[in-house]
Amino acid sequence: MTAAGCSNPFVDRIAFRPPTAVVTSSPTCLAENIVTDLTGLGPWDPALAGNAPEPGYPPADFRVVGALRCERGTDASGMRTIDSVRLEGDVLSVFSAFSADSFRFPDGTYASCINFGVAPVGLWLVDDTGAAFRPAWPADPCNLQNAPYLALRHLTEVGRSSHPNGLDDRFATSCEQDSHAASFEPTTADDVAAAEEPSENTAA
């Protein structure tokens, strides 16, 4: 066995790719495994479907046009929701970022990694027919790669639908994790409108 710190530039890395993702007819945020990972709750809700396919490597022939993100939310009455957030923008850059090779340490190498990132629970890439897959986040030996995160931040939220889960936000605990772990905040339509408004300092 050899020991390796994460910052050691002399330790070789091995490139690999996860299995190719399964494409489904449509994305959903109400799959049992997505809701359970987001909320910590079991399959109590009759609206929940079976488990969504596990994330995988982007299929080569997939023609991405948009994305869907699943997250926890709160409605106007203070009740918890599962939100399906539709995203548009430079999705080709997102697809490209998720198509990168992952890297790991060679077998027999021990890596002392302090923290390892956690990928978003519910993220789908969607084609023009509505079919979708869950992309696996490319990894480095001691963390997740930054490129998908940076690409996702440039997408714009274009719609949102909410499904109540029957829990009152007033009784939420401080022990819950972030709703999408390795969080990214997309640009909103209001952000775009504000950016297009002329500045008060612009000369007439």
Image: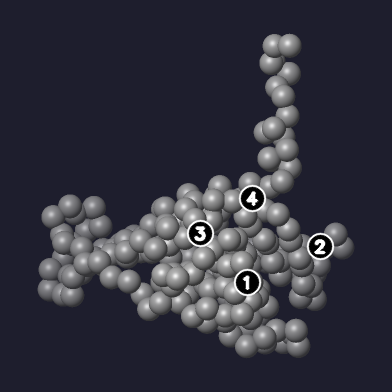
Disc 2 secondary structure class? loop
**Which one is earlier in the sequence, the residue at label 1 or at label 2?**
2
User: x%, y% of residue 122?
Assistant: 58, 70
Badge 1, how many Cα within 10 Å: few under 14, some, many 20+? few
Give the amino acid type for the residue marked by disc 4 in the picture: Thr
Give the quadrant of residue 73.
bottom right
Real-space Cα separation, disc 1 to disc 2, in angstroms: 30 Å
Marks 3 and 1 sit apart, C-alpha to C-alpha, by 28 Å
Q: Amino acid at mark 1?
A: Thr
Q: Residue at x 72, y 24 (%)?
A: 198
Callout in the foreground (1, 2): 1
Q: Residue at x 73, y 11 (%)?
A: 204
The answer to which image quadrant residue 112 occupies is bottom left
| Mark 3 vs mark 1: in front | 1
Task: Please give left or right for residue 170 compared with residue 183 in the image.
Answer: right
Name the mark on residue 129.
1
Disc on the earlier residue, 1 or 4:
1
What's the residue type where badge 2 is placed? Asp
> Residue 156 — which label?
4
Q: Nearer the viewer, residue 81 or 157?
A: 157
Position of the N terminus, as image quadrant, is: bottom left
In this view of the protein, which residue sits in the foreground, 59 or 149? 59
Q: Residues within 10 Å of mark 4 (few under 14, many from 20)?
A: many
Q: Select label 4 or label 3 by which is in front.
A: 4
Q: Nearer the viewer, mark 4 or mark 2?
A: 4
- SS class, disc 4: strand
Say which amino acid is labelled 3: Ala
- Residue where numbered disc 2 is placed: 75
C-alpha span from label 1 to label 4: 20 Å
Secondary structure state at the residue bearing disc 1: loop
